[in-house]
């Protein structure tokens, strides 16, 4: 995957920066990383070869600004030009990782609107404080594709309040590399994974880091094994796959598969917005599905009158009987917060797919 480093050099601003790999690598060459300078690859996205073809061929991802921070002050004078190149290449997708989300709006192009379609912003949160400092703002900013990166993960983090917004597409976790790497605990990773599963958010465990603790035992892991070990854990999660298999099963049920959103439902969603509909879904689930004892279980969800009701029947989240039969969540006890979030994410995914159907 191509990397585009329009400028090089950075200043440390966060606990995660302590053993920054840019500094580590530069110091091997006696270079000072704290000077930020444009690189010779500055215009890589629009560079052409002798045949006149773009050097960067249409690709899925271009990792952008990996030896600096795209939003660092020193680059304010260059960023407009960088954005212009990003806009000039809608056939590429630019992935930008930042610890300076608070500077996102500085030099933002005039035609940015709700965000360029070909840009994913990854907000780094290495600990709870950074998450709480950065994510409320991150969720407010006009960005089309938002992801979280928790690397190097320095402690337990509760992302629940942010993932529940439905605005985070993925979370990537990993430990720290290098001689002075701080320890990463597998339990922290697993806990974040659980949060992602509950909210139907993609999860990727990228690398163990050099010092990894599992079941209370510490391991030193050589660089070359840090990625493969993480892969071997086999804990990556992609809701699309889970949803696909669930929706395949639902499609085989005559009863479930006949539910559709009506034109009126779609109109309602357009008017209220998806966030409001999600709030309604959360409310319905909490009041009508979550209690341990439900007097009229099996009849608590009307057949129509709200897109969420229709979605509940379509996805078998309409009553505790269906929830047990289709989703393996037992009746007779209160639903946990995570189970409620799971039901909401299934409902919202069904609604999303309905809205995306052709001729709608
Ligand atoms: S923001 Fe990133 S590149 Fe800059 S010092 Fe911190 S870790 Fe290094
Ligand atoms: Zn039911």
Image (cartoon, rainbow, N blue to C red):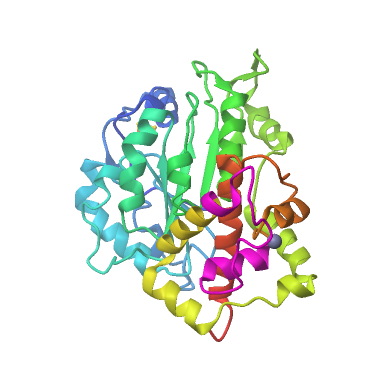
Image point (37%, 63%), residue name:
86
Decide whether residue 308 is among the magenta residues. Answer: yes
Q: Residue furthest top?
A: 217
Query: Residue reaching furthest front?
Result: 295
Residue 77 belongs to magenta span: no
Residue shown at the point (49%, 73%) measured from the top left: 51
- Give the magenta-colored segment's residue range: 286-315
Q: Nearer the viewer, residue 49 or 251?
A: 251
**Residue 26 appears in the rendering:** no
Residue 194 sits in quarter: top right
Numbered circles on residues, count = 0
Q: Quadrant of residue 142?
A: bottom left
Please say whether residue 216 is visible from this viewpoint.
yes
Spot occupied by residue 241 in the image (x, y as percentages of width and height): 69, 56
Q: Out of 141 and 83, give the one closest to the viewer.
A: 141
Residue lying at 21% horizontally and 55% vertically, measured from the top left: 107
Indicate whether 137 appears above or below 35.
below
Q: Residue at x 61, y 42 (%)?
A: 335
Left or right of residue 49, residue 205 in this image: right
Is residue 278 rendered to the left or right of residue 234?
Answer: left
Residue 346 horizontal/vertical position (percent)? 61, 58
In the picture as drawn, the residue positioned furthest to the bottom comes out as 359
The picture quadrant for ligand 1 comes to top left
Q: Could you tell me residue 258's position as x and y percent?
A: 70, 78
Left or right, 32 with reference to 227: left
Q: Position of residue 87 (x, y in %)?
A: 35, 67
Query: Which residue is more in the foreground, 327 or 8?
Result: 327
Please indicate whether residue 321 sits to the left or right of residue 71 in the image: right
Residue 218 picture quarter: top right
């Amino acid at each position: 995957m191509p990397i585009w480093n329009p400028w090089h050099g950075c200043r440390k601003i966060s606990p995660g920066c302590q053993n920054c790999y840019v500094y580590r690598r530069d110091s091997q060459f006696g270079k000072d990383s704290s000077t930020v300078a444009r690189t010779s690859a500055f215009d890589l996205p629009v560079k052409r070869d002798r045949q006149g073809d773009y050097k960067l061929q249409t690709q899925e991802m271009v990792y952008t600004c990996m030896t600096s921070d795209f939003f660092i002050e020193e680059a304010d004078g260059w960023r407009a030009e960088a954005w212009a190149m990003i806009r000039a290449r809608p056939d590429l997708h630019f992935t930008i990782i930042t610890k300076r989300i608070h500077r996102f709006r500085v030099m933002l192009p005039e035609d940015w609107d709700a965000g360029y379609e070909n840009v994913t912003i990854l907000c780094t949160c290495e600990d709870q404080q950074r998450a709480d400092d950065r994510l409320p703002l991150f969720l407010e900013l006009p960005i089309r594709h938002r992801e979280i990166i928790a690397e190097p993960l320095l402690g337990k983090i509760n992302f629940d309040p942010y993932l529940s917004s439905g605005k985070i597409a993925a979370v990537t976790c990993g430990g720290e590399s290098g001689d002075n790497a701080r320890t990463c605990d597998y339990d922290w990773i697993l806990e974040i994974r659980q949060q992602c599963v509950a909210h139907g958010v993609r999860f990727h465990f990228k690398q163990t880091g050099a010092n990894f603790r599992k079941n209370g035992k510490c391991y030193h892991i050589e660089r070359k094994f840090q990625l493969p070990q993480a892969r071997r854990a086999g804990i990556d999660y992609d809701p699309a796959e889970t949803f696909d298999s669930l929706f395949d099963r639902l499609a085989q049920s005559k009863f479930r598969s006949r539910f559709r959103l009506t034109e009126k439902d779609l109109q309602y969603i357009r008017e209220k917005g998806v966030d409001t509909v999600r709030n309604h879904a959360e409310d319905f689930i909490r009041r009508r599905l979550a209690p341990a004892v439900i007097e009229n279980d099996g009849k608590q969800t009307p057949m129509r009158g709200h897109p969420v009701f229709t979605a509940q029947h379509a996805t078998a989240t309409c009553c505790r009987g269906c929830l047990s039969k289709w989703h393996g969540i037992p009746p007779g006890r209160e639903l946990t917060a995570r189970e409620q979030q799971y039901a909401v994410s299934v409902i919202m995914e069904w609604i999303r797919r309905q809205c995306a159907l052709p001729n709608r």
